[in-house]
Image: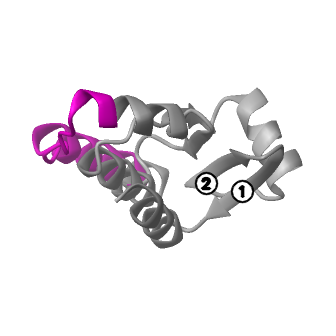
């Protein structure tokens, strides 16, 4: 099973590399404003996870610059479990007004980003 998942993961990464999708282009001043707002966001993800790829493609198509965090690294994994409550990716960490919110589910993350930054 591990071998099959590994092979499928590499196929997903190759397809994403070959067909990255078009990045949304904004005027420079508007993009700078959006970049400032997205500094408070971090996407915890695995590189070959199909749902993480789905979220990363949506982020790219919306022209957002959001930090991605590899949840396989032990310190990031611990932070995700301790603060977010579960080891599940993709997970969007949203820091706003001194509060931290952890959003799971790729469709919820994409809907949130579309609403906030469309």
Q: Is residue 17 magenta?
A: yes
Location of residue 90 by image quarter = bottom right
| Highlighted range, magenta | 5-30
Identify the residue position indicated by label 2 in the image. Answer: 91
For the C terminus, the quadrant is bottom left
Looking at this view, is 7 or 57 the one in front?
57
Which mark's residue is nearer the viewer, 1 or 2?
1
Q: Is residue 53 above or below residue 72?
A: below
Q: Position of residue 61 (x, y in %)?
A: 24, 50
Picture coordinates of residue 111, whole percent (x, y): 45, 70
Alpha carbon separation for disc pair 1 and 2: 6 Å
Q: Is residue 4 left or right of residue 16?
A: right
Dividing the picture into quadrants, the one containing residue 30 is top left
Position of residue 79 in the picture relative to residue 109 (left or right): right
Instruction: Report the disc number at residue 55.
Output: none
Residue 51 on image: x %, y %: 43, 60
Query: Which secondary structure is most common in the magenta stretch?
Result: helix
Q: Which residue is mark 1?
A: 102
Label 1 secondary element: strand
In the rendered structure, which disc, 1 or 2, sits on the residue that comes first in sequence? 2
Q: Residue furthest front?
A: 29
Q: Few, some or many C-alpha atoms within 10 Å of disc 2 (few <14, some 14-19, many ≥20)? A: many
Q: From this view, report whether residue 106 is shown above or below residue 21.
A: below
Q: Which residue is pictured at 52% across the width and 39% down the height?
A: 38
Q: Whole-percent x and y of residue 99? A: 82, 49
Question: In the image, 39: left or right of 3?
Answer: right
| Residue plotted at (17% across, 39% down) | 25
Residue sitting nearer the eye, 58 or 35: 35
Whether pointer 1 and pointer 2 mark residues with C-beta atoms closer than 8 Å, the reply is: yes
Which residue is pictured at 45% across the width and 59% down the height? Answer: 113
Q: Residue at 74%, 39% (x, y): give it.
A: 77
């Amino acid at each position: 099973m591990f071998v099959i998942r590994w092979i499928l993961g590499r196929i997903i990464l190759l397809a994403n590399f070959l067909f990255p999708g078009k990045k949304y282009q904004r005027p420079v001043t508007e993009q700078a404003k959006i970049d400032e707002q997205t500094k408070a966001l971090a996407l915890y993800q695995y590189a070959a996870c199909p749902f993480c790829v789905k979220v990363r493609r949506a982020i790219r198509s919306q022209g957002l610059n959001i930090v991605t965090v590899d949840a396989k690294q032990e310190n990031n994994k611990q932070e995700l479990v301790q603060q977010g409550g579960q080891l599940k990716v993709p997970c969007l960490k949203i820091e706003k007004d001194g509060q931290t919110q952890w959003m799971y589910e790729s469709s919820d993350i994409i809907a949130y980003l579309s609403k906030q930054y469309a």
